[in-house]
Image (cartoon, helix red, strand yellow):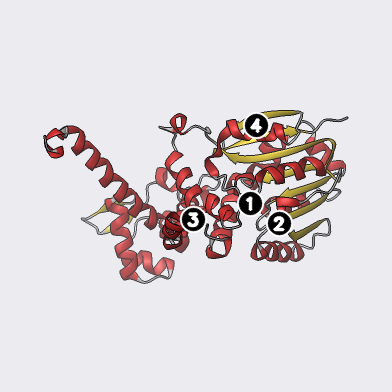
Amino acid sequence: MCQACSINVQSAEAFAGKLLGYLNGGAVGLMISVGHRTGLFDVLAAGGPATSHELAERADLNERYVREWLGAMVTGEIVDYDPEIGRYLLPESHAAFLTRSSSPNNLGVAFQFLPVLASVEDGIVDCFRNGGGVPYSSYPRFHTVMAEMSDQTVVSGLVEAILPLVNGMNAKLESGASLLDVGCGRGHAIISLAERFPKSSFTGYDLSEEAISHAKQTAAEKGLKNIKFEMRDLSAFAEPAKYDFVTGFDVVHDQKDPAGLLAGVHTSLKPGGVFLAQDIYGSSFVEQNIGGPLAPFIYTVSCMHCMTVSLAQGGAGLGAAWGKELALEMFETAGFESIDVNTLLHDVMNYFYVCRKSAN
């Protein structure tokens, strides 16, 4: 019997419909990124209904491009259109997730990952055939987007929601403590802490020269004297019993040597010190991630960035989808005495692990 004759027509049509949905969704996603970067969502929300010419003038953009973007937004059911008056409107319920004023709920920030990842597709396809990886240097906007994401998922809730996961952490930073942030990127998180806790000292390490340079410049512009940044390979570092706290925000899974990083973190903490790690929500077992709201996105980001940048260094290629089960195993192997796993309402994409070093 031919294969076509054995196909369940209803199932096939449903699958074809799903594929078309993915195709349209990906296209709309790219246009959402454009809308965020150009400020079109912000301008449309703030100014009310507008024609394409009015919106282009408000946003100081080319009308022809704005009109085509609006076509994608209307047919993608993001923006409403009234053909009788020729005006476009961003509903308040949509603006609540697409404008800068809606941060930390602005999902437009996350859509920027789609073009960033797509820009390295040729390199990724080559890796499928020949192995290896795509290096950090191939992602010119990655740290820009990550810094914006960090502002929403980390900085916005750092003092009020994240640090309180560690009993007494805010109080200790108030009185004076030492904190290291591994994989600090552009340093937005610990720069905010250095401003908030002037009696404490903060250190940030990252492999990216561009990110560290940007972090140093920002700290200097703010006149902060209690913070320093250094470009470092974290696969082999240890500063015995130097820090009260170590933080790592979506960092462990990207590393060349994640186990080496965790061992270094444990060694560098003082007795009784705490490692506060934010990392990707999900299971180490793919079957348990089926139906997860962000599972396909996480595996895609992993393949197109997290895993490959590690492999480019000859590393483990752990990837973003390493999962809670493996994370707990690796934290325990690194020597942490106890590990608590937390979730927070403002960040649906990550777990927050509180890993304590023995006081003895």
Label 2 sits on residue? 233
Horizontal and vertical percent for residue 212? Answer: 69, 62
Calculate the distance from the C-alpha at mark 1 to the C-alpha at mark 3: 15 Å
Q: Residue at x 70, y 31 (%)?
A: 332
Calculate the distance from the C-alpha at mark 2 to the C-alpha at mark 3: 22 Å
**28 over 289 or under it: above or below:** below
Calculate the distance from the C-alpha at mark 4 to the C-alpha at mark 2: 23 Å
Label 1 sits on residue? 256
Per the image, label 4 sits on a secondary structure element best described as: helix
Q: Amino acid at mark 4?
A: Glu
Would residue 296 appear left or right of 209 to someone viewing this image?
Answer: left
Per the image, label 2 sits on a secondary structure element best described as: loop
> Would you call the spot at circle 4 few (<14 residues within 10 Å), some (14-19), or many (20 or more)?
few
Label 3 sits on residue? 131
Mark sitting on residue 329: 4
Per the image, label 3 sits on a secondary structure element best described as: loop
Counting residues from the N terminus, which is met first, the one under dot 4 or under dot 2? 2
Q: Nearer the viewer, residue 101 or 78?
A: 78
Question: Which corner quadrant of the image does residue 324 belong to?
Answer: top right
